[in-house]
Amino acid sequence: MDKRVDSLAEAVAPVQDGAVVMVGGFGSSGIPFGLIDALLEQGATGLTIISNNAGEKETGIAKLLREGRVAKVICSYPRSPGSIWFERRYEAGEVDLEVVPQGTLAERIRAAGAGLGGFFTPTGFGTLLAEGKETRMIDGRGYVFEQPLHADVALLRADRGDRWGNLSYHATARNFNPVMAMAGRLAIAEVRQLSADALPPESVVTPGIFVSRLTEYGVRP
Amino acid sequence: MNRLNDADLARRVAQDIPDGAYVNLGIGKPTHVSSYVPDGREVIYHSENGLLGVGPAPAEGAVDVELIDASKRYVTTAPGASFFEHSDSFAMMRGGHIDIAVLGAYQVGSNGDLANWATLDRTFPPAVGGAMDLVVGVPSIFVMMRHTDRDGAPKLLDRCTYPLTGLGVVTRVYTDLAVLDIAPEGFRLVELTPGNTLEQVQAVTGAKIHS
Protein backbone atom coordinates (compact mmCIF):
# COMPACT_ATOMS: atom_id res chain seq x y z
CA MET A 1 0.00 0.00 0.00
CA ASP A 2 1.34 3.42 -0.91
CA LYS A 3 -0.86 6.51 -0.70
CA ARG A 4 1.90 8.98 -1.49
CA VAL A 5 1.59 11.15 -4.57
CA ASP A 6 4.37 13.22 -6.09
CA SER A 7 2.90 16.69 -6.07
CA LEU A 8 0.22 18.94 -4.66
CA ALA A 9 -1.20 19.26 -8.20
CA GLU A 10 -1.56 15.50 -8.57
CA ALA A 11 -3.13 15.32 -5.11
CA VAL A 12 -5.99 17.72 -5.93
CA ALA A 13 -6.47 16.69 -9.58
CA PRO A 14 -9.76 14.78 -8.94
CA VAL A 15 -11.62 17.74 -7.37
CA GLN A 16 -14.62 18.61 -9.54
CA ASP A 17 -16.66 21.77 -10.06
CA GLY A 18 -19.41 22.07 -7.46
CA ALA A 19 -17.54 19.86 -4.96
CA VAL A 20 -18.12 20.11 -1.22
CA VAL A 21 -14.64 20.66 0.22
CA MET A 22 -13.65 20.55 3.88
CA VAL A 23 -10.56 22.54 4.76
CA GLY A 24 -8.74 21.86 8.04
CA GLY A 25 -7.31 24.57 10.23
CA PHE A 26 -8.22 27.16 12.83
CA GLY A 27 -6.97 30.72 12.50
CA SER A 28 -3.61 30.33 10.75
CA SER A 29 -2.72 26.98 12.31
CA GLY A 30 -3.20 23.64 10.56
CA ILE A 31 -4.38 25.09 7.26
CA PRO A 32 -3.34 23.14 4.13
CA PHE A 33 -2.05 26.22 2.32
CA GLY A 34 -0.20 24.15 -0.28
CA LEU A 35 -3.27 22.15 -1.26
CA ILE A 36 -5.46 25.26 -1.41
CA ASP A 37 -2.97 26.94 -3.74
CA ALA A 38 -2.92 23.79 -5.89
CA LEU A 39 -6.73 23.74 -5.99
CA LEU A 40 -6.70 27.35 -7.14
CA GLU A 41 -4.35 26.39 -9.99
CA GLN A 42 -6.44 23.32 -10.79
CA GLY A 43 -9.43 25.57 -11.44
CA ALA A 44 -12.41 23.84 -9.77
CA THR A 45 -15.22 26.33 -9.15
CA GLY A 46 -18.69 26.56 -7.61
CA LEU A 47 -17.24 25.02 -4.45
CA THR A 48 -18.90 24.68 -1.05
CA ILE A 49 -16.21 25.24 1.57
CA ILE A 50 -16.59 23.79 5.06
CA SER A 51 -14.04 25.24 7.47
CA ASN A 52 -13.94 27.00 10.82
CA ASN A 53 -13.00 30.37 9.32
CA ALA A 54 -13.38 31.97 5.91
CA GLY A 55 -9.79 32.96 5.21
CA GLU A 56 -7.67 35.97 6.06
CA LYS A 57 -5.99 38.63 3.92
CA GLU A 58 -4.73 37.10 0.65
CA THR A 59 -4.08 33.59 1.93
CA GLY A 60 -5.78 30.19 1.93
CA ILE A 61 -9.55 30.20 1.55
CA ALA A 62 -9.48 33.97 0.97
CA LYS A 63 -7.73 33.32 -2.36
CA LEU A 64 -10.50 30.96 -3.47
CA LEU A 65 -13.08 33.62 -2.52
CA ARG A 66 -11.11 36.33 -4.30
CA GLU A 67 -11.03 34.29 -7.51
CA GLY A 68 -14.77 33.62 -7.35
CA ARG A 69 -14.45 29.86 -6.88
CA VAL A 70 -16.68 29.62 -3.81
CA ALA A 71 -20.49 29.41 -3.97
CA LYS A 72 -21.10 28.72 -0.29
CA VAL A 73 -19.24 28.79 3.01
CA ILE A 74 -20.24 26.64 6.00
CA CYS A 75 -18.30 27.78 9.06
CA SER A 76 -18.52 28.95 12.67
CA TYR A 77 -16.60 32.19 12.46
CA PRO A 78 -16.37 33.81 9.01
CA ARG A 79 -15.47 37.25 10.34
CA SER A 80 -11.97 37.91 11.56
CA PRO A 81 -9.48 40.75 11.20
CA GLY A 82 -8.42 40.65 7.56
CA SER A 83 -11.27 38.47 6.26
CA ILE A 84 -11.76 41.04 3.49
CA TRP A 85 -12.51 38.67 0.63
CA PHE A 86 -15.23 36.83 2.52
CA GLU A 87 -16.82 40.15 3.54
CA ARG A 88 -16.71 41.55 0.00
CA ARG A 89 -18.29 38.45 -1.52
CA TYR A 90 -20.87 38.22 1.26
CA GLU A 91 -21.91 41.86 1.05
CA ALA A 92 -22.23 41.57 -2.75
CA GLY A 93 -24.47 38.52 -2.33
CA GLU A 94 -21.98 36.38 -4.25
CA VAL A 95 -21.49 33.74 -1.58
CA ASP A 96 -24.00 31.93 0.63
CA LEU A 97 -23.22 31.53 4.32
CA GLU A 98 -24.32 28.91 6.81
CA VAL A 99 -23.13 29.70 10.32
CA VAL A 100 -22.80 26.65 12.59
CA PRO A 101 -21.73 26.69 16.25
CA GLN A 102 -18.15 25.47 16.34
CA GLY A 103 -18.73 22.35 18.44
CA THR A 104 -21.77 21.44 16.35
CA LEU A 105 -19.65 21.89 13.21
CA ALA A 106 -16.99 19.50 14.55
CA GLU A 107 -19.60 16.98 15.70
CA ARG A 108 -21.60 17.09 12.44
CA ILE A 109 -18.36 16.37 10.60
CA ARG A 110 -17.49 13.58 13.04
CA ALA A 111 -21.01 12.12 12.71
CA ALA A 112 -20.57 11.89 8.93
CA GLY A 113 -17.22 10.16 9.32
CA ALA A 114 -18.53 7.84 12.04
CA GLY A 115 -21.60 6.72 10.09
CA LEU A 116 -24.16 8.40 12.35
CA GLY A 117 -27.43 9.88 11.14
CA GLY A 118 -27.10 12.95 13.34
CA PHE A 119 -27.34 13.78 17.04
CA PHE A 120 -29.21 15.88 19.59
CA THR A 121 -27.24 18.74 21.15
CA PRO A 122 -28.24 21.40 23.67
CA THR A 123 -26.09 23.89 21.74
CA GLY A 124 -28.18 26.63 20.15
CA PHE A 125 -31.51 25.47 21.62
CA GLY A 126 -33.96 28.40 21.59
CA THR A 127 -31.69 30.55 19.39
CA LEU A 128 -31.81 31.69 15.75
CA LEU A 129 -29.46 28.89 14.76
CA ALA A 130 -32.01 26.27 15.80
CA GLU A 131 -34.88 27.73 13.77
CA GLY A 132 -36.57 25.15 11.58
CA LYS A 133 -34.75 22.26 13.24
CA GLU A 134 -36.30 19.34 15.08
CA THR A 135 -36.08 19.68 18.87
CA ARG A 136 -36.64 17.27 21.73
CA MET A 137 -36.85 17.51 25.50
CA ILE A 138 -34.54 14.98 27.14
CA ASP A 139 -34.56 14.82 30.96
CA GLY A 140 -36.22 18.23 31.05
CA ARG A 141 -33.69 19.93 28.84
CA GLY A 142 -34.08 21.18 25.26
CA TYR A 143 -31.97 19.65 22.50
CA VAL A 144 -31.64 20.39 18.77
CA PHE A 145 -31.28 17.69 16.11
CA GLU A 146 -28.22 18.24 13.93
CA GLN A 147 -27.48 16.34 10.74
CA PRO A 148 -24.18 14.84 9.61
CA LEU A 149 -22.03 16.96 7.33
CA HIS A 150 -20.45 15.02 4.48
CA ALA A 151 -17.89 16.23 1.96
CA ASP A 152 -16.58 15.08 -1.39
CA VAL A 153 -13.08 16.16 -0.46
CA ALA A 154 -11.19 17.00 2.74
CA LEU A 155 -7.98 19.03 2.50
CA LEU A 156 -5.76 18.40 5.52
CA ARG A 157 -2.51 19.62 7.01
CA ALA A 158 -0.39 17.36 9.20
CA ASP A 159 3.14 17.39 10.53
CA ARG A 160 4.28 13.89 9.60
CA GLY A 161 2.87 11.10 7.49
CA ASP A 162 3.87 7.69 6.13
CA ARG A 163 2.97 5.73 2.99
CA TRP A 164 0.02 4.11 4.76
CA GLY A 165 -1.56 7.54 5.27
CA ASN A 166 -0.98 7.66 9.03
CA LEU A 167 -0.73 11.25 10.27
CA SER A 168 0.63 13.05 13.31
CA TYR A 169 0.25 16.73 14.11
CA HIS A 170 2.19 19.56 15.68
CA ALA A 171 0.79 21.67 18.55
CA THR A 172 -2.61 23.30 17.86
CA ALA A 173 -2.40 22.54 14.12
CA ARG A 174 -4.45 19.40 14.85
CA ASN A 175 -7.86 21.13 15.35
CA PHE A 176 -10.38 20.05 12.66
CA ASN A 177 -7.98 17.91 10.61
CA PRO A 178 -8.68 14.52 12.28
CA VAL A 179 -12.50 14.77 12.04
CA MET A 180 -12.37 16.07 8.49
CA ALA A 181 -10.13 13.17 7.50
CA MET A 182 -12.95 10.85 8.63
CA ALA A 183 -15.71 12.75 6.80
CA GLY A 184 -14.18 13.47 3.40
CA ARG A 185 -14.83 10.79 0.75
CA LEU A 186 -11.46 11.79 -0.72
CA ALA A 187 -9.18 12.87 2.13
CA ILE A 188 -6.01 14.57 0.91
CA ALA A 189 -3.20 15.51 3.29
CA GLU A 190 -0.18 17.72 2.88
CA VAL A 191 2.47 16.84 5.45
CA ARG A 192 5.50 18.81 6.52
CA GLN A 193 7.55 15.64 6.38
CA LEU A 194 6.84 12.33 4.67
CA SER A 195 8.54 9.64 6.69
CA ALA A 196 10.39 6.89 4.83
CA ASP A 197 9.61 4.58 7.74
CA ALA A 198 6.25 3.82 9.30
CA LEU A 199 5.28 6.32 12.01
CA PRO A 200 5.46 4.78 15.48
CA PRO A 201 1.90 3.45 16.06
CA GLU A 202 1.54 5.29 19.37
CA SER A 203 2.29 8.64 17.71
CA VAL A 204 -0.40 8.19 15.04
CA VAL A 205 -3.34 10.56 15.61
CA THR A 206 -5.19 10.00 12.32
CA PRO A 207 -5.04 6.32 11.29
CA GLY A 208 -4.24 5.88 7.61
CA ILE A 209 -7.59 4.24 6.87
CA PHE A 210 -9.12 7.74 6.87
CA VAL A 211 -6.58 9.19 4.43
CA SER A 212 -6.82 8.68 0.65
CA ARG A 213 -3.60 10.29 -0.50
CA LEU A 214 -0.83 12.47 0.86
CA THR A 215 2.07 14.50 -0.36
CA GLU A 216 4.95 16.40 1.19
CA TYR A 217 4.81 20.17 1.54
CA GLY A 218 7.62 21.23 3.81
CA VAL A 219 6.69 24.85 4.25
CA ARG A 220 5.54 25.70 7.76
CA PRO A 221 3.65 29.00 7.42
CA MET B 1 -19.58 57.26 38.97
CA ASN B 2 -16.42 55.31 39.64
CA ARG B 3 -15.58 52.89 36.83
CA LEU B 4 -13.07 50.06 37.01
CA ASN B 5 -10.58 50.12 34.15
CA ASP B 6 -10.11 46.93 32.12
CA ALA B 7 -7.13 45.76 34.19
CA ASP B 8 -8.95 46.25 37.49
CA LEU B 9 -12.03 44.50 36.12
CA ALA B 10 -9.87 41.53 35.08
CA ARG B 11 -8.28 41.56 38.55
CA ARG B 12 -11.72 41.49 40.17
CA VAL B 13 -12.89 38.52 38.05
CA ALA B 14 -9.63 36.67 38.79
CA GLN B 15 -10.38 36.78 42.55
CA ASP B 16 -13.28 34.39 41.92
CA ILE B 17 -11.25 31.77 40.01
CA PRO B 18 -10.39 29.07 42.56
CA ASP B 19 -7.32 26.86 42.78
CA GLY B 20 -7.59 23.79 40.56
CA ALA B 21 -10.22 25.20 38.20
CA TYR B 22 -10.41 24.40 34.49
CA VAL B 23 -11.24 27.73 32.85
CA ASN B 24 -12.08 28.91 29.34
CA LEU B 25 -11.44 32.60 28.66
CA GLY B 26 -13.39 34.17 25.79
CA ILE B 27 -11.71 36.30 23.16
CA GLY B 28 -11.04 39.98 23.93
CA LYS B 29 -11.01 41.35 27.48
CA PRO B 30 -11.55 38.00 29.24
CA THR B 31 -8.13 36.79 28.05
CA HIS B 32 -6.51 39.27 30.48
CA VAL B 33 -8.01 37.54 33.54
CA SER B 34 -5.20 34.95 33.59
CA SER B 35 -2.64 37.68 34.33
CA TYR B 36 -4.31 38.49 37.66
CA VAL B 37 -5.07 35.14 39.28
CA PRO B 38 -3.58 35.36 42.79
CA ASP B 39 -0.28 33.58 43.45
CA GLY B 40 -0.57 30.07 44.81
CA ARG B 41 -3.58 29.07 42.69
CA GLU B 42 -3.01 26.61 39.86
CA VAL B 43 -5.59 27.26 37.14
CA ILE B 44 -5.67 25.25 33.88
CA TYR B 45 -6.77 27.29 30.86
CA HIS B 46 -8.61 25.63 28.00
CA SER B 47 -8.47 26.98 24.45
CA GLU B 48 -11.18 25.70 22.10
CA ASN B 49 -8.73 25.10 19.26
CA GLY B 50 -7.27 22.11 21.04
CA LEU B 51 -5.07 23.10 23.97
CA LEU B 52 -5.55 22.46 27.68
CA GLY B 53 -2.88 24.28 29.66
CA VAL B 54 -2.41 27.59 27.87
CA GLY B 55 0.83 29.24 28.97
CA PRO B 56 1.98 32.85 28.65
CA ALA B 57 3.00 34.55 25.42
CA PRO B 58 6.30 33.24 24.00
CA ALA B 59 9.56 35.12 24.39
CA GLU B 60 10.69 37.04 21.37
CA GLY B 61 12.33 34.66 18.91
CA ALA B 62 10.62 31.61 20.47
CA VAL B 63 7.32 31.82 18.57
CA ASP B 64 5.83 28.56 17.30
CA VAL B 65 3.45 29.66 14.53
CA GLU B 66 1.36 26.51 14.93
CA LEU B 67 0.81 27.10 18.67
CA ILE B 68 -2.03 29.60 19.03
CA ASP B 69 -5.03 30.25 21.27
CA ALA B 70 -8.67 30.86 20.37
CA SER B 71 -7.92 34.57 19.81
CA LYS B 72 -5.28 33.42 17.29
CA ARG B 73 -2.44 34.82 19.38
CA TYR B 74 0.85 32.96 19.78
CA VAL B 75 1.04 31.23 23.16
CA THR B 76 3.11 28.61 24.98
CA THR B 77 2.11 25.48 26.89
CA ALA B 78 1.93 25.35 30.68
CA PRO B 79 3.24 22.31 32.62
CA GLY B 80 0.76 19.44 32.28
CA ALA B 81 -0.63 20.70 28.96
CA SER B 82 -2.17 18.53 26.25
CA PHE B 83 -3.21 18.90 22.60
CA PHE B 84 -6.35 17.34 21.10
CA GLU B 85 -8.69 17.60 18.14
CA HIS B 86 -11.83 19.67 17.87
CA SER B 87 -14.52 17.15 18.76
CA ASP B 88 -12.62 16.30 21.96
CA SER B 89 -12.18 19.98 22.70
CA PHE B 90 -15.92 20.61 22.42
CA ALA B 91 -16.69 17.47 24.41
CA MET B 92 -14.79 19.18 27.24
CA MET B 93 -16.93 22.29 26.81
CA ARG B 94 -20.35 20.81 26.08
CA GLY B 95 -19.88 17.81 28.33
CA GLY B 96 -19.54 19.78 31.56
CA HIS B 97 -15.83 19.17 32.13
CA ILE B 98 -14.80 22.82 32.27
CA ASP B 99 -15.63 24.63 35.51
CA ILE B 100 -15.79 28.30 34.55
CA ALA B 101 -16.01 30.34 31.35
CA VAL B 102 -15.45 34.09 31.25
CA LEU B 103 -17.14 35.76 28.28
CA GLY B 104 -17.86 39.19 26.89
CA ALA B 105 -21.45 40.17 26.03
CA TYR B 106 -23.57 42.63 24.10
CA GLN B 107 -26.49 42.13 26.49
CA VAL B 108 -27.46 40.07 29.55
CA GLY B 109 -31.09 39.48 30.57
CA SER B 110 -32.31 39.41 34.18
CA ASN B 111 -33.29 35.78 33.45
CA GLY B 112 -29.67 34.88 32.65
CA ASP B 113 -30.09 35.00 28.88
CA LEU B 114 -26.89 35.92 27.05
CA ALA B 115 -26.53 37.78 23.73
CA ASN B 116 -22.94 37.95 22.52
CA TRP B 117 -22.78 36.66 18.94
CA ALA B 118 -24.94 38.76 16.62
CA THR B 119 -26.42 42.23 16.50
CA LEU B 120 -29.53 43.35 14.63
CA ASP B 121 -27.40 44.65 11.74
CA ARG B 122 -28.20 42.24 8.88
CA THR B 123 -25.40 43.49 6.64
CA PHE B 124 -22.82 42.34 9.19
CA PRO B 125 -22.05 38.62 8.72
CA PRO B 126 -22.78 36.76 11.95
CA ALA B 127 -20.00 34.78 13.63
CA VAL B 128 -20.79 32.45 16.51
CA GLY B 129 -17.57 30.50 17.07
CA GLY B 130 -17.70 28.34 20.19
CA ALA B 131 -19.88 30.58 22.38
CA MET B 132 -23.10 28.57 22.08
CA ASP B 133 -21.36 25.29 22.93
CA LEU B 134 -19.60 26.83 25.90
CA VAL B 135 -22.68 28.31 27.55
CA VAL B 136 -24.72 25.08 27.44
CA GLY B 137 -21.97 22.99 28.99
CA VAL B 138 -20.01 25.06 31.50
CA PRO B 139 -21.72 25.33 34.91
CA SER B 140 -20.35 28.79 35.84
CA ILE B 141 -20.65 31.44 33.13
CA PHE B 142 -19.06 34.73 34.17
CA VAL B 143 -19.78 37.71 31.95
CA MET B 144 -17.26 40.54 31.94
CA MET B 145 -18.33 43.75 30.21
CA ARG B 146 -18.98 47.47 30.41
CA HIS B 147 -22.22 48.26 32.24
CA THR B 148 -23.49 50.37 29.32
CA ASP B 149 -22.77 50.46 25.59
CA ARG B 150 -20.91 53.17 23.67
CA ASP B 151 -24.06 55.30 23.54
CA GLY B 152 -24.65 54.92 27.28
CA ALA B 153 -27.57 52.50 26.80
CA PRO B 154 -27.94 49.69 29.37
CA LYS B 155 -26.53 46.26 28.50
CA LEU B 156 -28.18 44.67 31.53
CA LEU B 157 -31.82 44.34 30.55
CA ASP B 158 -35.01 42.67 31.69
CA ARG B 159 -34.88 40.65 28.43
CA CYS B 160 -32.23 40.76 25.67
CA THR B 161 -33.22 42.36 22.37
CA TYR B 162 -30.30 40.92 20.34
CA PRO B 163 -30.24 37.30 19.11
CA LEU B 164 -29.49 34.95 22.00
CA THR B 165 -26.38 32.84 22.48
CA GLY B 166 -27.98 30.79 25.26
CA LEU B 167 -31.07 30.82 27.47
CA GLY B 168 -30.71 31.27 31.23
CA VAL B 169 -27.01 30.46 31.19
CA VAL B 170 -25.30 33.40 32.93
CA THR B 171 -24.16 32.92 36.55
CA ARG B 172 -22.58 36.27 37.41
CA VAL B 173 -21.92 39.60 35.67
CA TYR B 174 -18.84 41.74 36.35
CA THR B 175 -19.05 45.29 35.03
CA ASP B 176 -17.05 48.45 35.56
CA LEU B 177 -19.77 49.60 37.98
CA ALA B 178 -20.86 46.53 39.93
CA VAL B 179 -20.90 42.75 40.35
CA LEU B 180 -24.32 41.11 40.03
CA ASP B 181 -25.53 37.53 40.35
CA ILE B 182 -28.36 36.05 38.32
CA ALA B 183 -30.82 34.92 41.00
CA PRO B 184 -34.35 33.50 40.71
CA GLU B 185 -35.74 37.03 41.16
CA GLY B 186 -33.35 38.59 38.61
CA PHE B 187 -30.18 40.67 39.06
CA ARG B 188 -28.98 40.49 42.65
CA LEU B 189 -26.31 42.91 43.85
CA VAL B 190 -23.05 41.33 45.02
CA GLU B 191 -21.00 44.50 45.29
CA LEU B 192 -20.71 48.02 43.95
CA THR B 193 -17.49 49.48 42.63
CA PRO B 194 -16.35 51.56 45.66
CA GLY B 195 -17.76 55.07 45.60
CA ASN B 196 -20.95 54.20 43.66
CA THR B 197 -24.45 54.03 45.11
CA LEU B 198 -27.12 51.50 44.19
CA GLU B 199 -29.34 54.34 42.95
CA GLN B 200 -26.65 55.49 40.51
CA VAL B 201 -26.07 52.00 39.13
CA GLN B 202 -29.81 51.24 39.00
CA ALA B 203 -30.28 54.36 36.84
CA VAL B 204 -28.11 52.86 34.07
CA THR B 205 -29.50 49.32 34.36
CA GLY B 206 -32.43 48.12 32.25
CA ALA B 207 -33.94 45.87 34.95
CA LYS B 208 -34.43 46.00 38.70
CA ILE B 209 -31.38 45.29 40.84
CA HIS B 210 -32.35 43.32 43.94
CA SER B 211 -30.24 43.86 47.03
Image (cartoon, coloured by chain):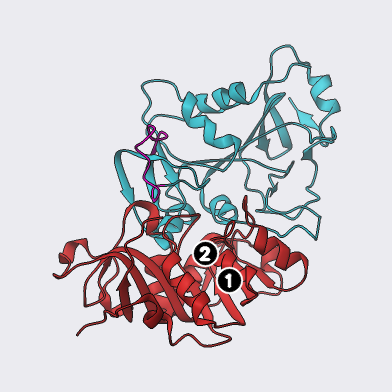
Chain colours: A red, B cyan
Residue A143, labelled with which disc? Answer: none
| Depth order, front residue of A10/B194 | A10
In the rendered view, would you say B49 is above or below A143?
above
Helix, strand or loop status at disc 2: loop
Magenta span main SS: loop
Q: Which residue is mark 1?
A: A64
Q: Does the magenta segment cover residue B148?
A: no
Q: Amino acid at mark 2?
A: Gly
Residue furthest to the top:
B195
Instruction: Residue B57 in the image: state x and y as whole percent.
Output: 42, 34
Instruction: Residue A110 in the image: state x and y as whole percent.
Output: 43, 72
- Crowding around mark 2 (Cα neighbors within 10 Å: few <14, some 14 to 19, many 20+) is many
Chain ID at mark 2: A
Q: Could you tell me if residue A118 is visible in this image?
A: no
Q: Which residue is mark 2?
A: A60
In the rendered view, would you say A145 is above or below A53?
below
Q: Could you tell me if residue B175 is visible in this image?
A: yes
Residue A30, by quadrant, is: bottom left
Quarter of the figure that contains the N terminus of chain A: bottom left
Q: Is residue A42 left or right of residue B210?
A: left
Q: CA distance from mark 1 to mark 2?
A: 7 Å
> Residue placed at 55% from the left, 54% from the top?
B130
> Magenta residues?
B54-67
Quarter of the figure that contains the C terminus of chain A: bottom left
Residue A72, by quadrant, is: bottom right
Q: Amino acid at mark 1?
A: Leu
Q: Does the magenta segment cover residue B62?
A: yes
- Crowding around mark 1 (Cα neighbors within 10 Å: few <14, some 14 to 19, many 20+) is many
> Residue placed at 57% from the left, 23% from the top?
B12
Instruction: Residue B202 in the image: state x and y as whole percent.
Output: 82, 26
Q: Are marks 1 and 2 in contact (CB under 8 Å)?
A: yes
